[in-house]
Structure formats: structure tokens, C-alpha cells
Image: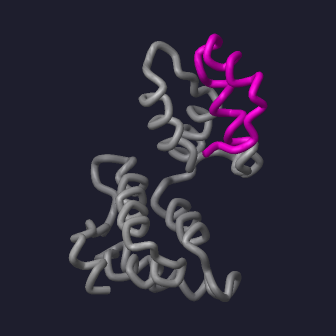
Amino acid sequence: MERFKKLQPTYFSKVDTNPLQPERWISAMERTFEVLECTDAQKLICVEFQLQDKAAAWWKSARPNLEEIHPNPTWEQFKEAFFENFFPKSFRDEKEAGFEALTQGLGSILDYQQQFKDLFHFASAHMRGDACKAKKFEKGLKPEISAMLAILEIQSYA
């Protein structure tokens, strides 16, 4: 916990004017966890200290429900519950449609990758597998780039 606190991770209390704030907070937490090489159990302990006010109250009531379904909840299961609570259904539906329609367009691959990462949290359940994720990313690239990658038959997003 000392190492975690030394990195000064951000707190989360509620959604403010930026509707993508919850996703940005989760991403920041994941970078911290990556540096510390945290287990799922450690991630959940750490994240509990970073939730404040309305978010802390939500987790206090949501945690027993999550543990009822999943006796040893994972970070992915926490994120799923977190996103369901802090992103309204209409917002999630809008972002899912944005993910489905996402292409590289005129931007760089790096810009496309960032948009893909931001919107992937809103992908429908059937798109969450690694092979589907890789295929969706590949199909969204500019045609000349996508055609080159198609030859490689890449099965992993990484």
C-alpha cells in the first residue's frame, strides 16, 4: 500500500462534466497497477482507497453483490460493475455505436488506437474476445494498411 500511495493515484468521487472521466480514471489506475505488478486482490484493495463520496458509497453497496456472484472478484469484474454504474445506459449505447462505426479515417494509427482503446469498454459482449478485438481493429484501419495486415492473419490484439 505504501508503494501505491507514493505514486499518488487520483481519486474518483463522481462523474463531473467530462462523461469519459470514469474511463480515464480506470486507465490511470491500470497504469499504476502495471507499475506495481498488482494482483486482482491488490487492485481491489487499492481502488477502494481511491473511491470517495458517492463512488465510495456505491462500492460499499455494490461490493457484497459482486462478491455474491463472484466470490473472488477480478479487476475486470470490478470494472464491468463500475462502468455499468457510472455510465448511463444511453451513453453506453451511444459509445457502443461509435465503437462499431470506428475507423482510422484521416488520422494516424496512434490516434485510431487511442480512440479504439477509449471506446472498447463499450463494445458489445461478443466483441470482447481477443481475436474479435484484433479483427475489429484491423478492419478499421485504412484499406491499404488493413490489406497488408490481413495477409498476416493476426489473431491477437496485442
- On whether residue 35 falls in the magenta region, the answer is no
What is the number of callouts on the image? 0
Percent across and percent down for residue 27 are 41, 56
Percent across and percent down for residue 22 are 40, 57
Could you say which is closer to the camera, residue 78 or residue 33? 33
* Horizontal arrangement in the rendering, residue 144 relative to residue 26 (left or right): right
Percent across and percent down for residue 145 are 61, 17
Residue at 33%, 82% (x, y): give it: 49
Could you say which is closer to the camera, residue 29 or residue 65? 29
Percent across and percent down for residue 24 are 37, 53
- On whether residue 137 falls in the magenta region, the answer is yes
Residue at 49%, 29% (x, y): give it: 112
Over which residues does the magenta segment extend? 132-158
10 above or below 125?
Answer: below
Residue at 66%, 28% (x, y): give it: 138
* Horizontal arrangement in the rendering, residue 118 relative to residue 158 (left or right): left
Query: For residue 13, which quarter of the picture?
Result: bottom left
Residue at 43%, 84% (x, y): give it: 45
Q: What is the quadrant of the C terminus in the image?
A: top right
90 above or below 80?
Answer: above
